[in-house]
Amino acid sequence: MRIILFISLIGFVFLTGCTKTQLNSINTDPTKSTATNFDPNNLLSTAQLNYANTGYYQLVYESTMMQVLASTYFYYNNGDKYINEGNFTDYQGAIFSQGYTEAGDIRQMQQLCIQKDSASYSNLINIGNIMFVLILQRVTDMYGDCPYSQADMAEQGVKYPVYDHQRDIYNAMLSDLNSAISKLDANRPKPTADLFYNGDISKWKKFGYSLMLRIAMRLTKVDPATAQQWAEKASAGGTFADISDNAIVQTDASNASSQNGTSIALRTLNDYEQVRWSKTLINYLRLNNDPRLGVIGEIPSGGLSNNGNETLAGNPDSSLQQGLPNGYDLLGGSTDIKNSPGYPGGTGAGADFAPLGNYSRPRTSVYLKLGGPIFVLSYAETELLLAEASIRGWKINGSAQQHFANGVTGAFQSLTQLDAQTEISQPSITNYLNSHPLDLSSVNNSLQMINIQYWIATGTDFNFIENWFNWRRSGYPNLIPINYPGNITMGTIPRRMIYLSTEILTNPVNYKAAVARLQGGDVLTARVWWDPNN
């Protein structure tokens, strides 16, 4: 248990006749938490915050790998050009380390609930089980086989947890999730420190079924029968109904430096000075007259004289937006951005000094403000997955066309949860949908449209990890990989991240067994079970 008993020792006490009971009374700070009075709800909020706050890790890798963002700066070569710069490989294992810390918080929360009053805390215990699945799905999707059945069982004597096969993890997650949802009871006490839904049990049920759908759809390549079974169950159970159900962690600008010792600044200006929206994304939005183009990006004021000053205002005029092509640098050779096709800056001194001044950055007042929201799971994602399930002929409530329209509408509307200035009028949304109905002429055409919209939705929500996971599953959009000199993936987009480097020292037998099951070993090009190379 990591519950800390806060006891202040006074030192030597020179009091005649002071008994041990009196000394304990004197030396115990009544304002501090103890194992008896500690509120387990606080561990839920800690796990939720830590789960959500991965902005930096996904900025370095998934955001540019998926050609949502791009960069010329060497710091982002890891994702933009598939090169491991310096010791940045530690970031690849960060989700592994963080995931088991979060899972540990959840299990400790549940143990404390059971010790105090399992009946009164039943909703918190079962929400904990849902959170456990949420956390470890991201871990297994990121790396492949990993501890699940023996995760966080050190107190039970499990010092070296086995890495379960991903197939077994997925079966267990679906079963555990179903059990947890069924035990939620709105008539019992609700959680009091819930960052997602403020303890609303009805929303947690919808979250559980929406997560069940996402887990099920990961299996479309390898086990479509199981995927169908659980997707239909999720649809019947009741998934998200609109954007008010979006699972979001709202950070606090007034306390942006830390919360419970953990940084809660999802994004800082310094991190984003050298990134821009990718040419791949901007060109797609422009080609399809997508009104999101006019609210997500801005050309920095000052043009060529402004390379990285994010404090200066930008211009969001959609006609001006220009995406930065992935795979370029500032080194003066053939891969220098000034040698890219259609480079808009010319060859003057200004172009040499500030090439990034030509390209659209994420709108600072929308994406880079402290206190912004962090998207965990959205209505748009859920509706688009329901559209795909329907296209596959599964028994889903509602038509594929309607779910597609709901998903696209939800993606537009969710932007307002980032900032009100991103609001796109309903007539504009309707016009877009009328111009881009779901193509039902073939299953492949439908799948492509659905999953490109998923890419846009998760990309513009800055949910880059989920963006990458779904691309690996669906294959859409059809991205052209970067073949930058010295890349370590043979010019292919990474399919997984490498395990936490310390695992070979702390859990060597189970780590080596898991790596042996990966074709090619613990490398970026290996594929997890649900992402076969076929």
Image: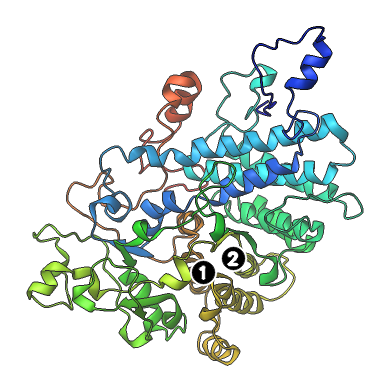
Residue at image x 41%, y 73%? 363
Q: SS for tag 2? A: helix
Residue projecting furthest to the right = 187
The amino acid type found where label 2 is placed reads Glu
- Distance from disc 2 to disc 1, alpha carbons, whole Å, reads 7 Å
Q: SS for tag 1? A: helix
Mark 2 burial class by Cα count in 10 Å: few <14, some 14-19, many 20+? many
Q: Which mark is residue 381?
A: 2
Asked whether 503 or 269 is in front, the reply is 269
Residue 153 placed where, x, y %?
66, 24
Position of residue 507 in the picture relative to residue 283 (left or right): right
Residue 493 placed where, x, y %?
34, 53
Residue at image x 72%, y 67%? 396
Position of residue 271 in the picture relative to residue 307 (left or right): right
Kindly indicate the quadrant of the structure image that contains residue 122: top right
Compared to 516, does 133 lie above or below?
below
Residue tagged by mark 1?
457
Q: Are marks 2 and 1 in contact (CB under 8 Å)?
A: yes
Q: Is residue 228 something one can see in this rendering? A: no
Q: Is residue 177 something one can see in this rendering? A: yes
Residue 373 placed where, x, y %?
56, 63
Compared to 86, does 473 lie above or below?
below
Kindly indicate the quadrant of the structure image that contains residue 297: bottom left
Q: Earlier in the sequence, mark 2 or mark 1?
A: 2
Q: How is the image coloured?
A: rainbow
Residue at image x 40%, y 41%? 92
Q: Which mark is residue 118?
A: none
The amino acid type found where label 1 is placed reads Ala
Mark 1 burial class by Cα count in 10 Å: few <14, some 14-19, many 20+? many
